[in-house]
Amino acid sequence: MELYFIRHGQSENNALYGAEDYDMGNRRSDPKLTDLGRNQAQLAADFLKRGALAAPIQRKGFQNRTEYGLTHLYCSLMERAVQTGSIIAQTLDVPLFGVPDLHEVGGVYYDEIIDGVSSIRIEHGLTPAYLLENYPRLNLLEPIPAEGWWKGGREERAARVPRALRMLDLLFDRHGNTEDRVGVITHGGFFFCFFRAIFGLDLDETNQHLLPYQVELNNCAITRFSIQEARYLLVYHNRTDFLPDDMVT
């Protein structure tokens, strides 16, 4: 299995960071892509499209200088990831599968202050009816409730790395020891959990901010692992050379 982690394009929340008038109160619980984010996703899709599906994986091809040939594509059910995945799936003409476990750390929530007290507003994310109407290329890997895929509330820190391990098990069950080339549209925070899960790094530490290292993934950046018999080769990380400098976020 050749495994490609791809972060979603710039979201409306991402665009808030660094703004002079930044206000956490403008944060959305499930933001969409910005215009820049959609353009990033299309450039990523065009880059992934190059080369032939049948091109063999050889050591000289590990850097994807001649081919990608993705055969499967998965995405989180947060809207920015579904949007990014839909653009890539449309361009590559490959199936797109939505997986609840791929969501960003924390889940779909909004922390609002009521009478000076922090309160988590209960939300449930996108509904199956909304997804069917707006993202017809998306296939749900498993049924989701009519009210939305998210259980509500804020995800506990202790649930994050186990969720990454569970997602890796799913990928191995479906693609382990195959020639499949699998793309996974995910989120920056959750990718760090994946990275730790893959390499068995500090799996008992629930607060990643206490770790002496961090792994960044830019919007629409690509990280590649080559995996055979549970042996992981990190081929490259955070690749954004297909984006103009002023579009790297």
Image: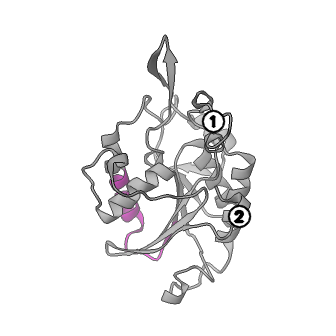
Quick one: which residue is furthest to the left in this view?
204
Quick one: which residue is furthest to the top in this view?
115
**Residue sitting at 65 percent across and 70 percent down?**
241
Image: 13 above or below 62: above
Q: Is residue 166 magenta?
A: yes
Q: Is residue 54 magenta?
A: no
Quadrant position of residue 90: bottom right
**Could you tell me what secondary structure mostly forms the magenta stretch?**
helix
Depth order, front residue of 231/206: 206
Q: Which mark is residue 1?
A: none
Q: Quadrant of the N terminus?
A: bottom left
Depth order, front residue of 85/248: 248
Q: CA distance from mark 2 to mark 1?
A: 35 Å
Amino acid carrying mark 1 in the image: Tyr
Depth order, front residue of 66/188: 188
Q: Which residue is mark 1?
A: 130
Which residues are drawn in magenta? 164-182
Depth order, front residue of 213/188: 213
Q: Which mark is residue 245?
A: 2
| x and y percentages locating residue 188 in the rendered image | 50, 52
The first of marks 2 and 1 along the sequence is 1
Mark 2 or mark 1, whichever is nearer to me: 2
